Each structure stands twice: as structure tokens, then as C-alpha cells.
Amino acid sequence: MRVEHHDELEVIIVRAFAGKTAQQVVDSLEAAQIANARMNTVSEFLDHPQLAARRKWQDVESPVGPLRALVPPFGFDDVRPRMGPIPALGEHTDQVLGGLAGLSEKEIAALREKKVIG
């Protein structure tokens, strides 16, 4: 029924939490034992202490210099995933189109001439 009455409920909820900080809203929901989660800003996500504590950041090389990259969220405690350098734009184009897609050098050159690829 909450889906059917979404618009009316939204007005009630917005009115109830208007003027409160995000923490006050979370505290109210927790006190009422209502499941909730607060959405972090991008900055809050990037600086989240759990990501640092669990060593979820790793520097990787890129064409513009080292960048901080998030380690994939899956894996084993004793195995770190391979985090190779970020390739430059077009760095592997010939390998992908030639080796994997089976295009000839002539076909790849024609794509470049037509500006389909860089």
C-alpha cells in the first residue's frame, strides 16, 4: 500500500524530517528501530575509514601519473588482486582488433582513416 500512496507518504516523511540534520534523522530512525542507511557523499565514501583500515586503496600507474584505485570488493585475505597500470587511450587498439577480433592491419588502417578509431 505504501507504493500506492507514495505521494502522500512522501509529504508526511519530508515534513517530519524537515529542518533536521542527517544525523538527527538517523538517530530518530534508530530510536524507533526502523531499518535505515544514510547515503554518503562521494567525499565521505572516498575517505571512509573502513576502506583505509581494510587496505582497499592501491596506487596504480596511468598516463597522467599515479592514481588511487579501489581494490575490487571480492577476493581472499591472503591474495591481492592484480592492479596493473591504466592503459593510454588507444594503447591496445591494434592488439584487440587484430589479435582478438581478427581484423587485418589493412582493415584497422581503414578504420583509422575513417576516424572510427584513434
Image (cartoon, grey):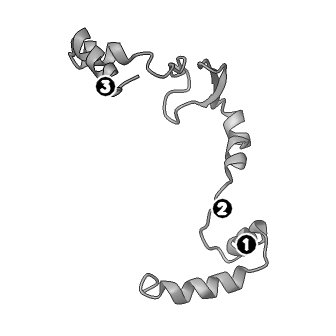
Tell me the residue at 53%/36% (across/down).
Answer: 73
Mark 2 vs mark 3: which is more N-terminal?
A: 2
Tell me the residue at 68%/77% (across/down).
Answer: 32
Inspect the image, locate mark 1, and give the three-letter code of the amino acid beneath it.
Val
Residue 113 appears in which quarter of the rendering? top left
Quick check: marks 1 and 3 in contact, CB under 8 Å?
A: no
Q: Is 33 on the left-hand or right-hand side of 49?
A: left
Q: Nearer the viewer, mark 2 or mark 3?
A: 3
Q: Nearer the viewer, mark 1 or mark 3?
A: 3
Where residue 21 appears, as percent x and y from the top left, is 79, 70
In the rendered structure, find residue 25 and report the number of the disc placed on it.
1
Q: CA distance from mark 1 to mark 3?
A: 57 Å
Tell me the residue at 61%/17% (across/down).
Answer: 61
Inspect the image, locate mark 3, and give the three-letter code of the amino acid beneath it.
Lys
Residue 19 appears in which quarter of the rendering? bottom right
Where residue 65 appears, as percent x and y from the top left, is 66, 19
Which residue is disc 2 drawn over?
38
Where residue 89 appears, as percent x and y from the top left, is 48, 22
Q: SS at mark 3?
A: loop
Q: CA distance from mark 2 to mark 1?
A: 9 Å
Q: SS at mark 2?
A: loop
